Amino acid sequence: MLRLYATVAAGGFRRHATYRVATVAGVFTNSVFGFILSYTYIALWDERPMLGGYSMDDALAYVWIGQALITVCGLMGGGFEDELIERIRTGDIAVDLYRPADLQAWWFSANAGRSAYQLLGRGVAPMAIGALVFRFTLPSGPGAWLAFLVAVALGSVVGFAIWYAVAMSAFWLLDGQGVVQVAWLGGLFFSGMLLPLNVFPGTLGEVARLLPWASLLQVPADVYLGRYQGRALAGAYAFQACWALVLLGAGRMAQAAATRKVVVQGG
Amino acid sequence: MADSLRTYRMVAGMWIRSTMTYRASFALTVFTSFCVTFFDFVVILLMFGQVRGLGGFSFAEVALLYGLTGTSFGIADLTMGSLQRMGKRVRDGSLDTFLMRPAPLLAQVAADKFALRRFGRVAQGLMVLVWALVLLDVAWTPVKVLLLPMTVVCGAVIFAAVMVLGASTLFWMQDAAEVTNSFTYGGNTLLQYPPTIFAQELVRGVVYVVPLAFVNWLPALHILGRPAPAGMPDAAAFASPLVAAVCCAVAGLAWRAGIRSYRSTGS
């Protein structure tokens, strides 16, 4: 059974690796946005040094980590939910449910493959470009890079769990666009992609740092910047893992409810 | 031209009726489209919660820049936003159906999947613009007042031309749609901030190469009584219609070249 899911994951990796032009185009776009955001952050941190506890170098690192993780952790869409929703809307999902594999585990594996490819294809290049032009904080050593990668992996799982649960709503709404947009909005704002969550003021900041979207970028970025050490690092991982479990569970329950009483769209 | 407009109206009308089938979803998408752009502005509000000025510009001045580009981009996105999905039609060959119909291709593709919800972005841009005008302390002259609607219209035309130009490249590279995003969405983000915070090479690029500076920077700086960026003369504030016309000509030529080189996948 594990071999099956490994194959699905490898397929997910290869499938996205096929579109090389799309990858280059994506890297280009991420870099352009990285540049724009970098200059706005420079203006902001010039006025208020150490805003949110970040130095200018930290803030710039944050910008480029964000650009690198957009697709990896599904900040602005998981990259699979449109397809899944379309299958639910057209009724093709019936074929998937017939397969001797679990629906969620199948998509989870495919997404893991996609995520791994995006990390290599669209994560590394923008960060390298950013590091060439701007001076920003780098992790202190291999151990710190490894700690960052673990946080990214957990972030990617939370990202999948969010978008899978979102896609499940299509069983009831058929047209999932509305819910996708709401989730997109949450991801855009509460992931901290536009502005780090520790710059958010007062209660808004406290709440934002507790929401699942904080696992996607804010936590990995803070791990990268070395703001979590020892037990605090374990705590940060636990925070991500908790959200992953809760949201994967929610997706599972929705899936169970939908398959128990599913009305497949015919046609 | 009249033919194109008629086609556009008919196709767009069809999609509006189709969207209204899923009313709950439509209501959600209009709301979120408004919120997505609203939260975009909240980021600027949060920034100004921490600082008094960005690059020497006050909140009201940044809001003017934001309102102008936001409204222009919103109009362009509402009318031409579907173009970026044309790559899929080129890839799977469904563009052939469009070519068979006795109606202008550009109008058909631009109105394809017309999404009325994108009006949320226009509304939000206008709200910020009005807010800026209320806050601003400017000695209004008839010329400056007339400059405002002209800027919004010309800005929308420039953005629309960039979208058509981007779509033209899809005839050759179907997966490169994201590159256009860096000029449209990226340009919109860039223009929300004052030119003083960016590197001078970048500013020169959007003045002389991709003339996005004419969308709002040049007219707005004139209204605010500030010098034009990148060594432009002050009169350049009134050059937007000319620039918009040139952009349309370039986009039209590219579109024609694109159609001529189109080869169906045959599937």
Image (spheres, coloured by chain):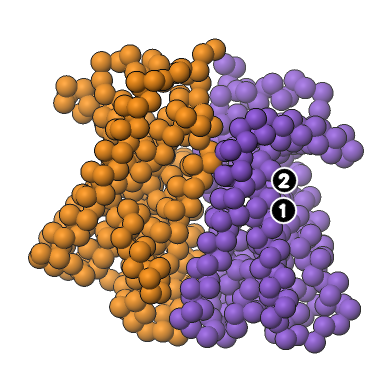
Chain colours: A orange, B purple
The residue type indicated by label 1 comes to Ile
Rendered position, B258 above or below A187 = above
Find residue A121 and report its horizontal and vertical position in percent.
35, 45
Secondary element under disc 1, as helix, strand or loop, is helix
User: Relative to B194, is A44 on the left or the right?
Assistant: left
Total numbered labels placed on residues in the image:
2
Closest to the observer, A96 or A266: A266
Residue B152 image-quadrant placement: bottom right
| Residue in view at x 33 percent, y 14 percent | A98
The residue type indicated by label 2 comes to Thr
Closest to the observer, A57 or A184: A184
**Residue B194 in sight here:** yes
Query: Which residue is under mark 2?
Result: B79
Chain where mark 2 sits: B
Find residue B214 and report its horizontal and vertical position in percent.
72, 67
**Residue A134 in sight here:** no
Chain where mark 1 sits: B
Find residue A67 and report its horizontal and vertical position in percent.
40, 57
| Residue in view at x 69 percent, y 21 percent | B97
Quadrant including the C terminus of chain B: top right
User: Relative to A153, is A41 on the left or the right?
Assistant: right
User: Relative to A152, is A257 on the left or the right?
Assistant: right
Quadrant including the N terminus of chain B: top right
User: Relative to A146, is B189 on the left or the right?
Assistant: right
Please tell me the numbered disc located at residue B75. Answer: 1
Closest to the observer, B93 or A203: A203
| Residue in view at x 69 percent, y 81 percent | B135
Check if mark 1's residue and mark 2's residue have beta carbons within 8 Å.
Answer: yes
Within 10 Å of the Cα at label 1, are there few (<14), some (14-19), or many (20+) other Cα atoms?
A: many
